[in-house]
Amino acid sequence: MLIMVMDTDFGWVADEAARKSASIEYRNFSTSLKLPEYALKEEENAFKSEGIIGKMALKTAIAKKIREAISQKIGKPFELDGEVNFRIDLDNRSVDVEIRPIFLLCKYKKLERGISQTRWEKYGSSVEGYIVDAAVRLFGATNAFLHGAGREDVDVRMLGDGRICTVEITGPTRRSVGFSMLEGLVRELSKGSVELYVLREASREHVWIVKEAHFDKEYEAVVEFGKKVSEEGLARVLSIKNIEQRTPVRVQHRRADLVRKKKVLFIKIEENDGKRVKFRIKTEAGTYIKELISGDGGRTRPSFAEAAGCSASCIALDVIKVHEYISDWW
């Protein structure tokens, strides 16, 4: 039985691999192989009776022959993690093709309010949605996903250099798409409200790295106070350094109700128009800025409202810098 399997002509495997991948653009391939049950049992019996020293495992030997046949047929090299993977089942004489996703390390800007970061039925447009539409069209992909390092609220713009993210493009039938083409189509589809900047091609590990990263951020916040705040009151606002934030009421339905200690790295006044003041604020990751300003009914202390001695509400908020380091060293 073993000899019969080894002497099999695997040209049909190469033919099927070539046929099923003919419409896919790829530079290399990998394989996964399922042997017939009878062959595995015969090999096990042979190893038990004759020993395994000096013998090549049957699956290894057959996989080698199949890879050589495929490579010769399609003119592409074998790689351990190829851009397409041929799943070969010798029991059922079938060959299926799995297309590896493309991962891009990127930054995005959101230049208008009212756009969510990820796809959400509640909102008509999203950063992810524009990227998906562009990727499906250009890469011939089945889908795409945006994995961001944190997120901003729907009514908050993402300005400055943008937010670091990984774009995962699944099922791409085309790969030789210039980064500038993707950037340009995202800009076109969003009518300039979203900009994507591709830094380089990445790997699956970047999804986890980006999502688990925690970066300090800078904001511009326009704050409306309940009254004109005195110089002493503003000085107290500017002196806020360490705060405790209980999970805000507005997100309590989807987040654990915890008290988190956060650092405010600086607060500066950029414009002061009586009751309305524009601040520049830098905080560590995970700080709720709107609640830092309003106090959230005492759930954040100290707050701008508490320091000023009157109500305070954030009427406009922008992220202007994410202090990330992934794009610099990874």
Image (tube, helix red, strand yellow):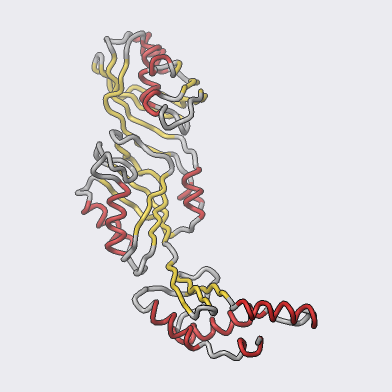
In this view, the residue in front, 17 or 203, is: 17
Count how many numbered circles sit on residues in the image.
0
Q: Answer with the quarter of the image where residue 61 lies.
A: bottom right
**Which residue occupies 41% across, 24% down?**
248
Q: Answer with the quarter of the image where residue 281 lies.
A: top left
In this view, the residue in front, 205 or 195, is: 205
In this view, the residue in front, 277 or 184, is: 184
**Which residue occupies 44% across, 80% down?**
17
**Which residue occupies 49% across, 81% down?**
93
Specify the quadrant that holds the N terminus: bottom right
Question: Whole-percent x and y of residue 249?
Answer: 39, 23
Question: Whole-percent x and y of residue 142?
Answer: 34, 61
**Which residue occupies 33% across, 40% down?**
160
Question: Whole-percent x and y of residue 220?
Answer: 33, 29
Furthest-left residue in this view: 191
Question: Whole-percent x and y of residue 256?
Answer: 48, 29
Determine whether 85 is above or below 151 in the image.
below
Determine whether 120 is above or below 202 in the image.
above
